[in-house]
Image (cartoon, helix red, strand yellow):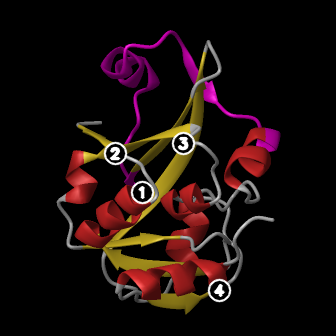
Amino acid sequence: MPATPDDLFAYFRTLGIETRTAKHAPVFTVEEAKRFRGTLSGEHCKSLLLKDKKGALFLVVASEDRQVDLKRLRQTLGVANLSFARPEAVRETLGIEPGSVTPFALLNASARAVRPVLDRAMMAAEQLNYHPLVNTHTTTIRGADLLRFLETLGYTPLIVDL
């Protein structure tokens, strides 16, 4: 059974990671998030689940206004063709609904089936904002704590210039 937001927050507590979470209307796009998030401070981010021609999955995470050039990213990753993963892959691999994609969902991914790819510019921000497994909340976390969270799950994210 996939982790819930409460499970995620409990995991953060076991790691000594402090977060802040705000509730809002469901958001599915960056534009909706900008309207509903209120005055949350920190860098607001988007997460994309992509797959290559061979079926390898990449969770690409960047600042919300960053343009992700898939052709350039494909070259950076050394893979053939990148496309958006189907909604079924989001549910099966990350254990969340489409529209809630977040690096926190790697808590649900088994056997490191997804390669996290983080934008270097985003990681320069002190505070980062992501959905906590649902798109009705936004959670703020320090960049260093995001990296520690991923490392405890066995992930070594690739940090690149998008």
Mark in the foreground, 4 or 1: 4
Q: Which residue is mark 1?
A: 64
Tell me residue 104's x, y (percent): 52, 64
Asked whether 86 falls inside the magenta stretch, the response is: yes
For mark 1, give the secondary structure.
loop
Magenta segment boundaries in residue numbering = 62-88
Outermost residue, top direction? 80
Residue 119, image x and y in percent? 30, 46
Whichever of callouts 4 and 1 sits on the residue coming sooner in the sequence is 4
Q: Is residue 47 magenta?
A: no
| Above or below 43: residue 109 | above
SS state under label 2: loop
Q: Earlier in the sequence, mark 3 or mark 1?
A: 1
**Residue in the picture at 21% in, 66% down:** 125
Q: Split into 4 quadrants, where in the image is the C terminus? A: top left
- Residue 114 rendering spot, x and y as whole percentages: 55, 39
Residue 118, horizontal then vertical, whole percent: 34, 46
* Mark 2, other Cα within 10 Å: few <14 / some 14–19 / many ≥20: some
Q: Amino acid at mark 3?
A: Arg
Badge 4 marks a residue whose secondary structure is helix
- Return the residue at label 4: 6
* Viewer-side label of 3, 1: 3
Q: Earlier in the sequence, mark 4 or mark 2?
A: 4
Residue that label 3 marks: 112
Query: In the rendered structure, which disc, 2 or 1, sits on the residue that comes first in sequence?
Result: 1
